[in-house]
Amino acid sequence: MTSTREISWMPIFSLTTIIASLAVFLFQVYYWLKVGDWLPIPLQSAMQFVGLNFPSTSWLGIQKVYEYLYGAPLSVCILGVYFIGAIIKNLTPE
């Protein structure tokens, strides 16, 4: 009888998102200590770095939501992804 072990993705996902969020924040603190000026890193900067363009739509309300989300701090967005993953994990049966 062969036993297959399932690798749980949640601990790896949790650790990765927390470390990434902390790394972005600590880089901002390092920059502030060195230069004396806070370096904002919005989600839009990360999306442009990986080659994703800013979405645009003719619907003004949706465009405002895009602008708000893309202007949010990257470290907060990464933590948001962590919390969404935790919610999904708790909603799915084992």
Image (spheres, rainbow, N blue to C red):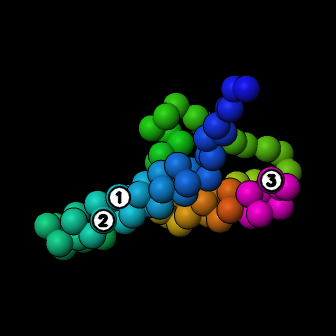
The residue at the point 30 percent across, 65 percent down is 26
Front-lying residue, 20 or 12: 12
> Pointers 2 and 3 in contact (CB under 8 A)?
no
Q: Secondary structure at mark 1?
A: helix
Q: Secondary structure at mark 3?
A: loop
| Labels 3, 1: front one | 3
The residue at the point 21 percent across, 65 percent down is 30
> Pointers 3 and 1 in contact (CB under 8 A)?
no
Q: x and y percent of residue 70 in the render?
A: 60, 55
> Pointers 2 and 1 in contact (CB under 8 A)?
yes
| Labels 2, 3: front one | 3
- Amino acid type at image mark 1: Ala
Residue 92, quarter of picture: bottom right
In primary-sequence order, the first of circles 3 and 1 is: 1
Q: Which residues are magenta?
A: 87-94
- Amino acid type at image mark 3: Glu
Does the segment drawn in magenta span residue 91?
Answer: yes
* Observer able to see residue 84: no
- Amino acid type at image mark 2: Leu
* Observer able to see residue 81: yes
